[in-house]
Image (tube, rainbow, N blue to C red):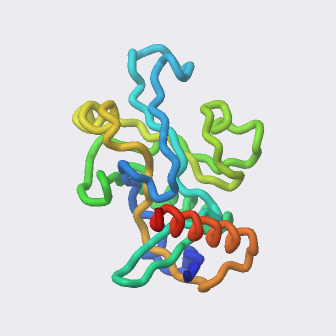
C-alpha cells in the first residue's frame, strides 16, 4: 500500500491548517481530555472550565485514507508538524472550528498550543497523554454551551482533527521506522478484516 508524506509548502498561501474540528473518531487516534476544576488547578472562577486538551497532529503516525478505490496512508514529519502549527497561529486561525469537518461552529478557541519536546517533563505527561516527542498539542476553550452540553459532555466528540491543505512529498518515507509502522498497521487491519 502506498505511503505518502504530506508537507507544508510555505510559499503557497493556501497550504496549511485552516481549522480544528472536534470529531467522534480522530484520524490520529488520540482522544482529548475535558479539563474541569478537579483535574487542573486554574483560578477557581467557574465550576467547569470547559477546556479540551489533546493532540492536534502527531508526527510520523500513519493515517489511513481511501479515495475511491485507492487505499493509502499519509503521515507528517516532525518538521512539518512544527511548521504547520506555527503557520496556523501566525495566520490567526485560533477561532476556526468545525464539527465533524461538516459544520462551522462558533465559540471554540485554541487558547494554548505547544510541541512536545520531552518524554518526561511535558504537560501532556501530567494529563496521561502518551504521545511522541514532536506532537502538536493544544487546549481549546469551549464558550459554546450547545457544543459543550450536546457533544462534549455526551461523549459524541472525542478528539481533534485538523483541516487544511498540504502537498505530497513522496510515495515512500525516508524513515524506515515509519514504513515499518505503517506495514504493521496494514497487517493488523488485514487480520481484523479476515476474522
Q: Is residue 45 left or right of residue 186?
A: left
Residue 145 vertical placement versus 17 (above, below): above
* Residue 26: % across, % down: 44, 53
Q: Residue at x 60, y 85 (%)?
A: 171
Q: Please, which residue is most extreme toward the front here? A: 195
User: Total number of numbered labels?
Assistant: 0
Q: Residue at x 52, y 43 (%)?
A: 54
Q: Is residue 143 left or right of residue 57?
A: left
The quarter in which the N terminus is drawn is bottom right
Displayed quadrant of residue 146: top left
* Residue 88: % across, % down: 49, 60
* Residue 55: % across, % down: 54, 48
Q: Residue at x 40, y 52 (%)?
A: 25
Residue 83 in view here: no
Residue 165 vertical placement versus 56 (above, below): below
Q: Residue at x 64, y 67 (%)?
A: 184
Displayed quadrant of residue 174: bottom right
* Residue 131: % across, % down: 64, 48
The residue nearer to you, when weighing 150 against 10, is 150
Amino acid at each position: 500500500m502506498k505511503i505518502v508524506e504530506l508537507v507544508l509548502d510555505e510559499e503557497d498561501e493556501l497550504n496549511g491548517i485552516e481549522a480544528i474540528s472536534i470529531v467522534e473518531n480522530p484520524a490520529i487516534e488520540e482522544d482529548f481530555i475535558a479539563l474541569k476544576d478537579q483535574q487542573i488547578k486554574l483560578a477557581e472562577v467557574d465550576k467547569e472550565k470547559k477546556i479540551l486538551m489533546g493532540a492536534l497532529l502527531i508526527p510520523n503516525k500513519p493515517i489511513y485514507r481511501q479515495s475511491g478505490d485507492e487505499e493509502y496512508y499519509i503521515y507528517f514529519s516532525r518538521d512539518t508538524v512544527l511548521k504547520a502549527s506555527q503557520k496556523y497561529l501566525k495566520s490567526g486561525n485560533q477561532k476556526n472550528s468545525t464539527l465533524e469537518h461538516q459544520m462551522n461552529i462558533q465559540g471554540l478557541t485554541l487558547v494554548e498550543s505547544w510541541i512536545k519536546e520531552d518524554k518526561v517533563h511535558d504537560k501532556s505527561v501530567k494529563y496521561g497523554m502518551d504521545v511522541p516527542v514532536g506532537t502538536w498539542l493544544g487546549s481549546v476553550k469551549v464558550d459554546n454551551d450547545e457544543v459543550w452540553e450536546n457533544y462534549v459532555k455526551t461523549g459524541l466528540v472525542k478528539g481533534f482533527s485538523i483541516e487544511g491543505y498540504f502537498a505530497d512529498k513522496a510515495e515512500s518515507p525516508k524513515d524506515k521506522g515509519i514504513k515499518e509502522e505503517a506495514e504493521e498497521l496494514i497487517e493488523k487491519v488485514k487480520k481484523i478484516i479476515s476474522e
